[in-house]
């Protein structure tokens, strides 16, 4: 079956359950190969390459590996590494691989302890090398497979048909987000709505296929694998009827949006109290492994960067001081994570009498209030124009990164009065650290309208990955050198 939408071809030759089984079979084969290769490489390095006399042949260890690899795959299964709901989950999946591999090695150590007085002794060096090679190959295989699957999804393959129940603002926002996230694995076929919207109506890029009464007909007809429910569009009885009809259907996954999709980007936590599942909102967009990766990137680049740039920083400070009277560093009060305000450091690029200059030019003051930027700003000093053109004035913000107030990559920093410009999205902005660079900076900087900046910031927060940060950092260099939109 081939479905065409917006010029993209999407293939659904097998039911979702069959595709899941094929994927699990591929993963089992890949993991078995990775484990076998890791044990063989460990033997080769420990007994063939390093100066060491092997008391046991490769055949002896092959018997041990042959018995242990199936058991290790069971350990992988216990750690949910073949559960379709946890596959391709990024850092969480890699953490599960680490834990499963480590537990397997511990099991081998225990086996070795009981065999040490028998006819066979397991080499400790081989165990350590096996652990390292298994981590490298198992993690690498998952990473490589993930990249392959994502590449195929971007080309329209391996996508599951999804139906969104609810065509209100939340439902449309869900469809837009899924459309923009090409690697999600879902293809939105259309909407089903509880109201009397006419079938055939188009909302954004997707048609309204019918009402809730048509749901049981549409699911098999369109081969729907995922039903995504926007609860704000339905009554409680309508929600219950959907779960009664499809909640135990093994061919269809029913997912419930939080009802706060337009506002919350941080993720939700479910905790059962008095046998009642209660949902709480995470207060930070990045936690656990994601936060650790971002911190490693920030400090790993900032500390050597400051050392390397220190002569330039001293020269710029001297130039600012000699060019015009006033302090070298300008402190701008901005919003941080959780609404905490802090001073963002910049080299001063304006005259200290800038307010008086602006007061004498009411048309410029009105333009500044509207756009938060002036293209030909009379308050900017001679040195300031050069610093702004190449974003050198923002280098002192590296110290804000060291202080944990900012990140190298993130949404643009805003002052407290600007929060009103973000409206309902403002809460999202306060869940991540502002960045020296980000999506809006590499998309045109000051040439981008304020509304577009808000949209780009929200896209970054919703779709953050460590790979997106690395990509934006690499794109920043040519953008800064080209000085597009810098004023």
Image (spheres, grey):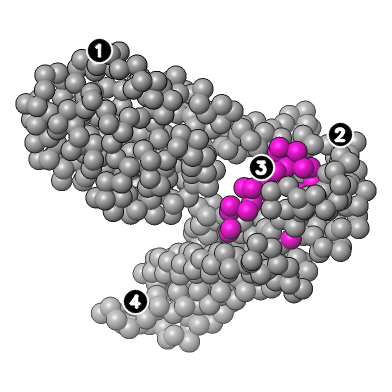
**Quick check: can you spot residue 149?**
no
Q: Earlier in the sequence, mark 2 or mark 1?
A: 2
Q: In what element is the residue under mark 2?
A: helix
Mark 3, Cα crowd under 10 Å, few <14 / some 14-19 / many 20+, is some
Mark 1, Cα crowd under 10 Å, few <14 / some 14-19 / many 20+, is few
Q: How far apart are marks 4 and 2 (CA)?
A: 64 Å
Residue that label 4 marks? 46
Q: Which of marks 3 and 4 is nearer the N terminus?
A: 4
Residue stretch rendered in magenta on the structure: 161-183
Q: Distance between the residues labelled 3 and 2?
A: 21 Å
Q: Earlier in the sequence, mark 4 or mark 2?
A: 4
Q: Which of marks 1 and 3 is nearer the N terminus?
A: 3
Q: In what element is the residue under mark 1?
A: helix
Tell me what residue is drawn at x 45 percent, y 64 percent: 135
* Left or right: where 87 falls relative to 197: left
Residue that label 2 marks? 236
In the rendered image, the quadrant that contains the N terminus is bottom right
Residue that label 1 marks? 356
Instruction: Using the image, determine if residue 87 lies above or below residue 399.
Output: below
Relative depth, front residue between 38 and 355: 355
Could you say which quadrant of the image residue 372 lies in? top left
Q: How far apart are marks 3 and 4 (CA)?
A: 56 Å
Q: Which of marks 3 and 2 is nearer the N terminus?
A: 3
Q: In what element is the residue under mark 3?
A: helix
Residue that label 3 marks? 173
Q: In what element is the residue under mark 4?
A: helix
């Amino acid at each position: 079956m081939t479905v065409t939408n917006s010029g993209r071809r999407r293939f659904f030759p097998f039911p979702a359950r069959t595709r899941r089984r094929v994927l699990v079979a591929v993963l089992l084969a890949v993991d078995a190969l990775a484990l076998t290769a890791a044990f063989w490489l460990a033997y080769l390095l420990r007994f063939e390459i390093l100066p060491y006399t092997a008391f046991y042949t490769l055949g002896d260890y092959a018997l041990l590996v042959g018995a242990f690899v199936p058991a290790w795959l069971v350990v992988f299964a216990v750690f949910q590494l073949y559960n379709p709901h946890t596959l391709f989950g990024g850092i969480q999946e890699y953490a599960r691989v680490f834990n499963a591999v480590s537990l397997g090695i511990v099991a081998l150590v225990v086996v070795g302890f009981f065999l040490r007085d028998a006819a066979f002794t397991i080499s400790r060096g081989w165990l350590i090398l096996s652990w390292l090679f298994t981590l490298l190959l198992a993690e690498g295989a998952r990473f490589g497979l993930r990249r392959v699957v994502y590449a195929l999804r971007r080309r329209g393959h391996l996508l599951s048909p999804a139906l969104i129940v609810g065509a209100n603002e939340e439902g449309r926002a869900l469809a837009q987000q899924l459309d923009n996230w090409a690697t999600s694995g879902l293809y939105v076929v259309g909407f089903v709505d509880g109201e009397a919207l006419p079938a055939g109506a188009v909302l954004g890029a997707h048609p309204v296929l019918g009402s809730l009464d048509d749901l049981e007909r549409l699911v098999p007809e369109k081969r729907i694998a995922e039903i995504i429910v926007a609860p704000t569009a339905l009554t409680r009885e309508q929600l219950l009827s959907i779960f009664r009809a499809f909640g135990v259907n093994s061919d269809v996954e029913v997912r419930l949006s939080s009802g706060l999709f337009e506002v919350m980007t941080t993720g939700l936590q479910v905790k059962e109290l008095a046998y009642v599942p209660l949902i709480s909102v995470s207060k930070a967009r990045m936690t656990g492994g994601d936060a650790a990766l971002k911190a490693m990137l920030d400090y790993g680049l900032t500390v050597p960067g400051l050392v390397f740039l220190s002569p330039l920083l001293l020269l710029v400070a001297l130039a600012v001081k000699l060019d015009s009277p006033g302090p070298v560093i300008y402190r701008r009060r901005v919003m941080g994570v959780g609404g905490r305000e802090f001073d963002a450091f910049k080299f001063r690029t304006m005259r200290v009498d800038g307010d008086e200059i602006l007061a004498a030019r009411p048309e410029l003051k009105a333009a500044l209030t509207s756009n938060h930027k002036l293209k030909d700003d009379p308050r900017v000093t001679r040195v300031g124009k050069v610093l702004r053109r190449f974003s050198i004035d923002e280098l002192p913000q590296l110290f804000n990164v060291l202080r944990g107030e900012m990140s190298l990559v993130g949404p643009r920093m805003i002052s407290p009065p600007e929060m009103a410009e973000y409206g309902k999205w403002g809460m999202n902005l306060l869940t991540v650290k502002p960045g020296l660079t980000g999506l809006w900076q590499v998309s045109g900087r000051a040439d981008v309208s304020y509304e577009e900046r808000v949209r780009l910031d929200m896209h970054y927060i919703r779709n953050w990955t460590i790979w997106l940060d690395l990509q934006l950092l690499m794109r920043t260099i040519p953008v800064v050198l080209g000085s597009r939109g810098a004023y």
